[in-house]
Amino acid sequence: MSSWMKMLKDLTVRPKGERRIRKSPSFSFDEDMNKPISGQTVKEILSKSSDIVFREFNFPGKSRIPCMLVVVDGLVDKNILDQFVLKPLMVDLNHHPDLERVTLANVIDITIQSFLPGIEIKKIVKMEEAVSTILSGDAVIFFGESSEAISIGARGWANRGVNEPIAESIVKGPHEGFTETLRINTSLLRRKIKHPSLRIISLKLGDISNTELVVVYIEKIANKDIVSEVLLRLSKIKMDSVIDVGYIEEMIEDFPYSPFPQIAYTERPDVLAGKLLEGKVGIILDGTPIVLVVPAILMEFLNVNEDYYQRAMTAILSRFVRYVGSFVAVVAPSTYIAVTTFHQEIIPTDLLMSISAGRQGVPFPALLEALTMTIVLEILQEAGLRLPKPIGQTIGIVGALIIGDAAVNAGLVSPLMVIIIGLTAVASYAIPYYDLSLAVRLLRFPLMILAGILGFFGVAVGLYAILIHLLGLRSFGVPYTSPIAPLRVRALLQDTFVRAPWWALKRRPQLIDVQEPRSKGKG
Amino acid sequence: MGTTFLPIASLTTGVADRDGWMAVLPGFALGIPYGLMIMSLYKKYPQKNLLQMTEMLLGKWVCKIIGVLYILIMSYFGGLLLGQIGDIYESSIMPRTPIEMFYLGGLLLVLYLARSGIEVFTRFTEVVFPLIVIALVLNMGLSIPRIEQGELMPILGQGIIPIILAGSKVTPFVMEYILFLAGILPFLPADKQEFTSLKKGVWLAVFLVGFMNTLVVLMQIVIFGPSETVNLVYGLLVLGKMVEVSRTIAGVESLFLGAWFGALVIKICAFFFVVLWSLESLFGLKGTKSHLVVGMIFMGVALNNKRGPGLVVEIGLVDNYLIFPFASLWILTIWTFSHWKKKVGVS
């Protein structure tokens, strides 16, 4: 195989086995990691970093064992260390009755059992674990030449408080959101589901970043096959670093080249709790407030949790508006192009005259007009997205009012086109999930081109091609278009296009083969 | 369904005049015995298609001859249907667009659907079927103000014989489904309960299609009158052209064509699958190359065939003189042989 063919294959074909994207570099201390635990070796590995603190002291009593506490400055709570580690060991211990029987062989066991208060205290025996524990924000105490050490949970760093997520704000319902700290996130989830069946499985990803991650699910409800598949796919990931869930998403999704999102995400504990109760599996990564949820289906990206907090009738209306909005966002520009270019017969004469008058003097065909306007809209959206809020609003006003008005007055675009593009933009905001909204934005372009070349036939070809693509997608084995195809009437009527009242939601959604299909809490 | 809605009114009314609408359901019913025969064969030879059963019952060479005939008929008919996409779009709403573009668009969709596999194909039908029904109901519902009840009278003015003859014009459509069923047999569920529910679903779908077709014929007769219905080959599109909703939307035939196009893609893809399966059964050919070859054959037939009324006549001829006799003889022969062999104890 030629080198460029190999390169093309590397870029386009995801390996089926181990999903490695970058080989980790080897470090001088790699060999040290396999050695028995020793304070001296840890010092050699970590002393080159100025934020690592090595606090050396001698164990009280006759033994005088040299000890060393190692922490990362800024990641630990110094008060905890002072009050509950150093003070008990250096001051309070002098009068302890067990102090006289301490030797190097039993110092660790006695310290854990008798000397140190606190919950997160455990013995560690591997060098790799010791280094990883220190770098994760816990404290580790090494005792002389002992081949074991003690880790003490003393994490405490500056973190963002529990705020309402900006991207998922709601009117009615809880206003708390996940943060960047893993344990805060798991605690928020625990507060929603106080049941022993909630499982939280810990993993670590990233050869260098050593990012903590947990897989959460409800054992009594979740499908075991899906849980195993999630764990299997995660275990196959080999990367240098995992900074955000986006890294994981692309590695574990079924169809990486589809524009459609196949993994749901949320920043809200109530949403995650709701999805776990439907039998889904969550992936929480340390360092990001976004939590992944699998499996995901298309209709899920059009529904929001607020639907369940409102009255059923208003929720149905909200959903209907969202579905119509999504459809308009996909087809509005292409339909306009097809109608004005090929199918004027569909418009009654009076309306046709009005449209023709508006387009009079416009030098471009409808396709070019629509493409230009859509690209301008995309630029405005992209420009406004990452600017500070006040400037972002100004960009919107300048773009929508000044440029749009000037373009119409200059006769470059027709007023109706400005309305259509504006309507499309507003309609795309009705899509609650940003990832799906991006997919819709992407698909608008080929549809517009097809409409410009082949009218409604082109639009039909494009829409059917999208439909076939959607029908072929799966998310962790669950058909993406379920419950429409394959048709699940109950799920369709219970919680898809309509949201049945709570007293009628007696069964969990049939999309996943859950272990307890009947919901005891509902109905 | 894809090809039945448009020409069925013209076909049945041409024989039974204003009583044409009564011929649709009996015409569909004529296919029932063949459906039952296929089901009974499937029970005896589970997970085998009709060609494989033929090989088991009649031997390798007879199977090869029948198989080649089957492939030829299905390829030719699939190509004709592909041609119909271009013909209808060109003649009704886009006369200035090169007809080849419609062939290409249709064929690309068929190839994509076939490449996606039988599971996606069945889901596609699940989604498109309601769209067609909605489009039909809307088209007919919005035409209600144009109904002239007198066009139906007198009922049974020419007796029952023309209705039976008109029914025979509908039966070939059913035979198309039966031939597809002959190919899809290995993909049907082996589980008895699932198979029973599938059978129910098939009968319900056949009845629903028959009922919708009856309505289509009825509406065209009461709106256009029998003589005009015979002349309008694609009467339903003309019906769509006449629709106007509150001076805002008019001529919805282009929208109706969108749904009809989806149905035709399903039908062409069904024949595409049948040809692929047959090639695999007979000659062991499969993979991307066989998809492309079959696609080129379909395209070749579409490009080199008649257009306009000539194409409709050609489709009718293939239906009446190739598909109908071929399917009825083949299925009946296999079914009879399987029973005879059982009786004489040959396995």
Image (cartoon, helix red, strand yellow):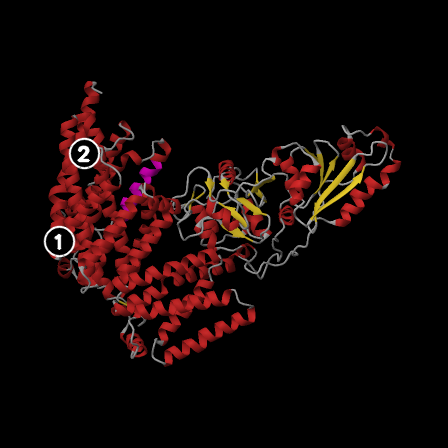
Q: Chain of mark 2?
A: B
The answer to whether any part of residue B162 appears in the image is: no
Front one among A319 and A417: A417
Residue in the foreground of this view, choosing between B153 and A269: A269
Q: Identify the element where label 2 is drawn.
A: helix
Q: Calculate the distance from the C-alpha at mark 1 to the C-alpha at mark 2.
A: 28 Å
Q: Amino acid at mark 1?
A: Leu
Label 2 neighbourhood size at 10 Å, few (<14), some (14-19), many (20+)?
many
In the rendering, at what x and y percent does residue A357 appear? 30, 79
Q: Secondary structure at mark 1?
A: helix
User: What mark, if any, has residue B311 been given in the picture?
Assistant: 1
Residue at the far right in the pictured view: A95
Q: Nearer the viewer, mark 1 or mark 2?
A: 1
Please tell me which residue is depicted at 64% across the width and 46% down the height of the picture.
Answer: A190
A518 or B70: nearer the eye?
B70
For label 1, count other residues whose C-alpha is less than 10 Å away and answer few (under 14), some (14-19) or many (20+): some
Specify which label sits upstream in the sequence, 1 or 2: 1
Instruction: Pick the quarter of the image with the N terminus of chain A.
Output: top left
| Residue that protrudes farthest toward the bottom in the picture | A409
Chain part drawn in magenta: B196-208
